[in-house]
Image: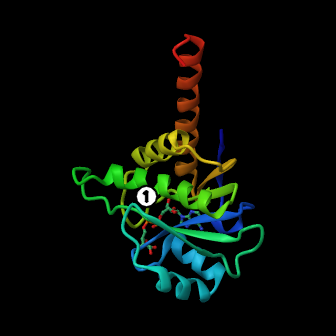
Amino acid sequence: MAVIEVVQGDITLQDTEAVVTAANESLMGGGGVDGAVHRAAGPRLADAGAAIGPCEPGDAMATPAFDLDPPIRHVIHAVGPVWEGGEYGEAEVLASCYRRCLEVTDGLGARSLALPAIATGVYGFPAAQAARIAVATLRSTPTEVERIRLVAFDQQAYDLLTAELAAASDRTHVQSDSGQG
Ligand code: APR
């Protein structure tokens, strides 16, 4: 069972083997967390992304981490859904991003992963609903990853993710206490 934690900070500074960036379909970089990851990893990241892209929304693809500091060895480029009001399958596409990030990390044999709040910036996904999807998907997806770190960039995201993780854990304890687990 993976340990899931929430921290507030910069995804490029995490001590995990893999870090996720919230990419666009080209995988050639952009703003937000993608801009930070590409700046820290250097220009080879965009070249590597271009070589394997495009990447469909809901999917994730891995490249080396290039100039990012160890222990980070892999960048996993996940493409989130653009929020269009919630009636176009955005929730399922976001859940798919988190599932695919774990699957890709397993494929790399990496055991620790840091992820940002995918799609909640430029793509406009409501932060509270995104936090619920992130925690529920990461908790329910079978994986060999031992340490999953949700990295909030601001206090609001940190508070939402922390609350969602606590609520999900409480629900699990209640079920197990009442013998329904
Ligand atoms: N570390 C961790 N999280 C960060 C960082 C950082 N250095 N910088 C920004 N974030 C957070 C934002 O605060 C937001 O909560 O990452 C989350 C995702 O926001 P975006 O980076 O805007 O990503 P997204 O909403 O998925 O939009 C993706 O934006 O940058 C472009 O190329 C990218 O087209 C793509 C789109």
In the rendering, at what x and y percent does residue 64 appear?
Answer: 64, 77
In the rendering, at what x and y percent does residue 41 appear?
Answer: 65, 80
Q: Which residue lies furthest to the left in this view?
A: 87
The residue carrying pointer 1 sits among few (fewer than 14), some (14 to 19) or many (20 or more) residues within 10 Å by Cα, namely many
Does residue 10 appear anywhere in the picture? no
In the rendering, at what x and y percent does residue 86 appear?
Answer: 26, 50
Does residue 130 appear anywhere in the picture? yes
In the rendering, at what x and y percent does residue 32 appear?
Answer: 50, 71
Q: Tell me the quadrant of the picture where the C terminus can be found.
A: top right
Residue that numbered label 1 is attached to:
120
Residue at 48% across, 76% down: 31
SS assignment at label 1: loop
Vertical comparison of 29 with 20: above or below: below
Q: In this view, does 49 lie to the left or right of 96?
A: right
| 159, 144: nearer the viewer | 144
Vertical comparison of 168 with 67: above or below: above
| 107, 116: nearer the viewer | 107
Q: Mark 1 vs ligand 1: CB under 8 Å? A: yes
| 168, 154: nearer the viewer | 168
